[in-house]
Amino acid sequence: MFYVYADDKPQRFSYIVFPHINTGISFFKGVEVTRTNFQIHVNQQPQNLTTCCAEIIGKYTNPLFVNYEGNFEEIAVIFKPLGVNQFFEENLNQLAPDYAQALTNIKWVDFSYALFAELGIEARLALLETFLLDNLIEKDI
């Protein structure tokens, strides 16, 4: 499942994410992400509007408070249980030992730049689907 967020006007909103069994990877453009005490803050960085990154959510047992501020772009992929393991040599516990962290795998970080270089959401989602298919590692889990 994909989620897309983009707004041309600065926004500020928050929500709570309750523990669940899915895993998310989000690609961002023009933000700084900070994580403290089961809180995730995603803030626009006007001086770094072209900076891209990828974040991965690990397992957690407490609700997470998520705060967005500014105008920026995000495309998220939500994986069913064990689904994310089909795209990495490492398992989820190795990739994401904390409730939230930067995804530092260079292939995925480089892809975040390619993703946001595309114009239009349809082109971006098509590129994302191709990237996922190209990086699929079928495992017998």
Image: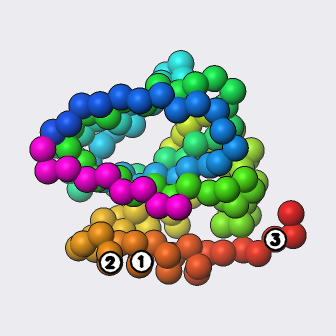
Q: Can residue 114 be seen from the camera position used here?
A: no
Q: Amino acid at mark 2?
A: Ala
Q: Is residue 62 left or right of residue 41?
A: right
Contact (CB < 8 A) between labels 2 and 1?
Answer: yes
- What's the distance in space between the residues labelled 3 and 2, CA to CA? 29 Å
Report which residue position mark 1 lands on: 127
At numbered mark 2, what does the secondary structure look like: helix, strand or loop?
A: helix
- What percent of the width, then of the height, locates residue 48? 22, 47
- What's the distance in space between the residues labelled 1 and 3, CA to CA? 23 Å
- What percent of the width, then of the height, locates residue 64? 53, 27
Above or below: residue 1 compared with residue 46: below
Number of the front mark, 3 or 2 = 2
The segment highlighted magenta reads: 1-9
The residue under the point 58% across, 42% down is 57
Q: Amino acid at mark 1?
A: Leu
Report which residue position mark 2 lands on: 123
Mark nearer the N terminus (1 vs 3): 1
Q: Amino acid at mark 3?
A: Lys
Report which residue position mark 3 lands on: 139
Q: Can residue 73 be seen from the camera position used here?
A: yes
